[in-house]
Each structure stands twice: as structure tokens, then as C-alpha cells.
Image: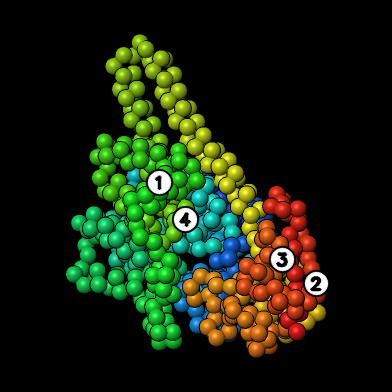
Amino acid sequence: MAKRKKAGKHRRDEDEKDFGAFLKKHWHIMLVILICVAAFLVRLHYLSLHSEYTTDSYYYMILARSLKETFSYTERGAIHTKYLPGYPLATLFASFLAGGIENGANLVAILFGSLTALVAYGLGLELFGKWVGVCAALLTAFIPTFLKWTCLPMTEGLFTFLFCAGLYFLLTGCKRGSFVRRIVGAVLGGFCFLTRWEGGLFLPVALLVVILYARRADIKKWEPLLLIGLFCLPIGIYVIRNLVLAGRVSSYFGEYKEYKQPLSLGIIMDKLKLYAIDSMGDPLLSFLFYGSCAWAFLRKRWKPLLILVVWFGVFAGFHVLWHYPYERFMAPAVPALAVMVAFLFVDFLTVSWGFLKRRERRRRKFSAVYTGAEMLVVILIIASLGFVVARSIARSDAIITPHYKALADDHGGKGMRQAAEWLLYNAPGSVVGVDAGPLFAWEYHPGKVLYLRPVPWDLPVEGEDVSPPRLLSKLREKDVDYLVIGQTERGVQSELLEIGFTPDEIKELKMVKRFVNHYDPPAVPKLETAIFSVG
């Protein structure tokens, strides 16, 4: 008995020793995990402040609900070919864990947005070293543009995670000569492509990674075709579905043809300024990125430099050609910027420390001075990194706060939700015409909804929605019972005229319910949402 107790105690001591050795060797990984947890909690906080989401958010949730309830990818019963199904599919699966579609959409957005910091660590580790990885994770977690668009149900978190994870597995698959890792990388890239059309930009960056590290990879002649095939398979299935059911690849082609503008020098320069300088939410981050690129060039870190510059550049270049500018299009390039800037901080510290150490060895009588200088350099670099992160968090708050307040009163905000609840309780099964589609369509379920104004490509349902002239007659022909109008800053009467109702048609409408809401900060003293009986 005594021997068994002694042997058990010895095993416990050995286990504790092994665990202690593990922590000592890998404590930086615990630091990265803490960064991911902090990123999640910060995103959860900002999510809780949103009373309303973007128009795109509601379409994603409506499509996920369609998949769950009818096993079809439709919007109000029509075949949908605009938004890709990656995020709605992820929302569907998450909904079983999170307790509903909306919770599932939020969980996917903030969870994968937070986990992107972990993958940024992996990329920084493989391209430069572990401390670059740790700093890259910290920067990725709190860069304003990425934080803004991963604290509400949008695609940025999932898309960027898949983009980064695919590159990570391709990179490590090439460096370690692992065929399985390269397969995983191609599959993740394929699901990235199924999440947003910009996923096609994964291909040139991935090919560059494979070319730069092909010597170590032991790639067979047939393997590139297999990897490209796996990458194209998910989007290929979706495109075939669109062609068979709707006769088109995507509604984005029609949108681009209708809305594109001729590219003048002025437009190109404005877009370049947006994507090259302002897109991160803080111009300081962009200038640090370019300074980091110059530093990497001087340090002859050709391969990582080329990969990260091409990654950043393909997103900026592609969206210069797109028909409208938006800073969120650069969110997937945030990890590239973060890894590059992290390299600047860590490598500058390493070079400075090494220089001072060499001087100290040569002039030992001044060792105390050099030791002090070494400590000062460490403090300054850490303080500089801390300043950049703290500034990013402060800028994020300054950007997100007006954003969620602006979303709150969009198209009547609370009033649209109140109108949907009132109709579901007082007039269930009614057919409703509405001027602000997706929010109301999300809330007024399973009721039938028609839209009254032109909306972006593929969102109207042909043969169902109505547009001027003769709006009132068209609504009656389609057996519409009620009309819901959400006020912006012009007032309900002006909204009706703006949509296309004539003064005589407005006289025939009977208001049955009115909701008044106040917002912070209020655009006008009060905002109204009205329900009219069509009669």
C-alpha cells in the first residue's frame, strides 16, 4: 500500500513538472487565447448595444431561416442569387446551439471575428516568429474596421477567418511537406469563396504561397489541379444551381452593369485614398503598414513581404474597380496589415537589443549604461505597441457608437418592429406592403410582404412587388390589406409622396395605428411609423 501511494505521488509530481514545463515553453499561447477571449467579450459588448442591424444582416437571417424552414435558398419564396450561402449556412448550424437564427447569426459573426486573432497568430508565427504572431493577434483583435464589422451579424468575421485559415494551412502544408494540410487549406479557401465573392481573391494569394514555398512542399504534378478543384467545388455547385433554377450566375453581374460609373482619375484617386489610407479606421495603421513594408524590404524578408503586400493589394485593387466604395471591403486584409506591423515592432526591438548587447560586450565598463538603454528600448517599443492598440480601441468606440445609433432609427427602426408585432397580433395572415423591406420582412413572419420601392438587385420578387404609377390600384389588385410606412426625417406624408403615391391616393388611405419613437441622438424630435388600411 505504501509503495502504491509513493508511486502515485511520484506520478503526480512528474505530471505537475511536465505541465509546468509546458506552460513555461508555451505561455505565449495562453496569452493569445486571452486575447481571443477579450476580443470576444468586446464584440459581445458592442453587439448588445445594437437595437437594429444593417439591411444585409436581415437578408442573411431571412435566407438562413428559409434554409431551416423550407430547405430552400429563397427570399419571400423567390430563388435567391445575390448573397452567397456560406454565412446563412453557418448561421443555420449555429442556430441549433445558440437557440435561434438571430442568435446563431450573432454567434458566427463575433466568434469567428475573435478567432481570426488566433489564425493571425499562426500566420505571424510561420512567416516571422512567435512574438510577431502574438502582436499580430493583438492588433487583429482591435483594429477599428474589423471590430466594427464583426460585432453585428455580417460576413466579415467568418470570411476573414476562413481566408486566413486557408492560407495558414497552405503555408504550413508547403513548409512541412504535408499533403493533408494543403488539402485542408484548399477546402477552407473554397468555403471562403462560398461566403463572399471576394473569396476568389484567395486564389492568387494561395498560388503565391505555393510558388514561394514549393521547394519544400514535394508537390506532385497532379496536385495543383486537385487543390484548385477543391477550391472551386463549393462555389461551382452554387453557380450550377443558379444557372439551372434562375438562368444566371449571380445578380451581382446585373447590379454592376446598372450601377457602375466610368472610372475617372478623380474617382480612382478617391477610392485609392479610402482603401490605402482610411480603410482601417485609423490612418496611423495604414502608415505603419507601409513603414513596416519598407522595413521588411531593408531586412530582406522577401517572401513574407510579398505575400502580405499582395494580400493587402488584391483587396484594395479589386474594390477600386467595384461600382461603389466602402471601407468594410478591406476588413479581410486586416490580418495582413496586423502581421506586417507586428513584424516592425518585434524586429525593431530585436535589432536594437542586439546592437546594444554587442556594444555592451565591447565596452564592459559601460555595461550599466547599456543595460539601462536595453530596458529603455524594451519599454518604448512595448509602450508604442500599447499606444497603437489603445488608440485602435478608442477609435473603434468612436466609430461604432454613432454607427449603432444611426442604425437604430433607420427607416423607422423600432417602429417597424412595433408595426410587425401589432399586425401579427391584431391582423394575422394579412398581406402587407412596406417601404423598408428586410427588417419588416424578418419581423413579420410568417406573413406575406410586398415591397413598394426599388431596392438593390435581386431583392424584389418579380410579379409580386409593386412600383409607381397606380400604386394603390396595384396594391388592391394583389389583395394587400395594410401598408406600413417607416419615417426617415421627412415625415410620413412626405414618405408616401416620395414612394410614388399621388395626393388623391393618399386621401384614400386610412391610418389605423401610429408609433412614435425617440432616438439618441434624435435626427428630428420624433420619428413616426404608420400602419394604413388599404381598403
Asked whether residue 107 appears in the rendered view, the answer is no
Q: Residue at x 66, y 53 (%)?
A: 405
Q: Earlier in the sequence, mark 1 or mark 2?
A: 1
Query: Can the viewer see residue 175?
Result: yes
- Sequence-first tag of 4 and 2: 4
Q: Secondary structure at mark 1?
A: helix
Q: In the drawing, does residue 502 fall left or right of residue 509? A: left
- SS class of the residue under badge 3? helix
Label 1, label 2: how many angstroms apart (C-alpha)?
A: 47 Å
Q: Which residue is mark 4?
A: 326
Residue 170 placed where, x, y %? 33, 60
Horizontally, is 260 left or right of 394 in the view?
A: left
**Helix, strand or loop at mark 4:** loop
Q: Residue furthest front?
A: 504
Q: Nearer the viewer, residue 107 or 448?
A: 448
**Looking at the rendered structure, which numbered label has been put on residue 273?**
1
**Residue with the mark numbered 2:** 513
Say which label, 1 or 3, has the lower sequence index.
1
Q: Amino acid at mark 4?
A: Tyr
Q: Amino acid at mark 2?
A: Lys
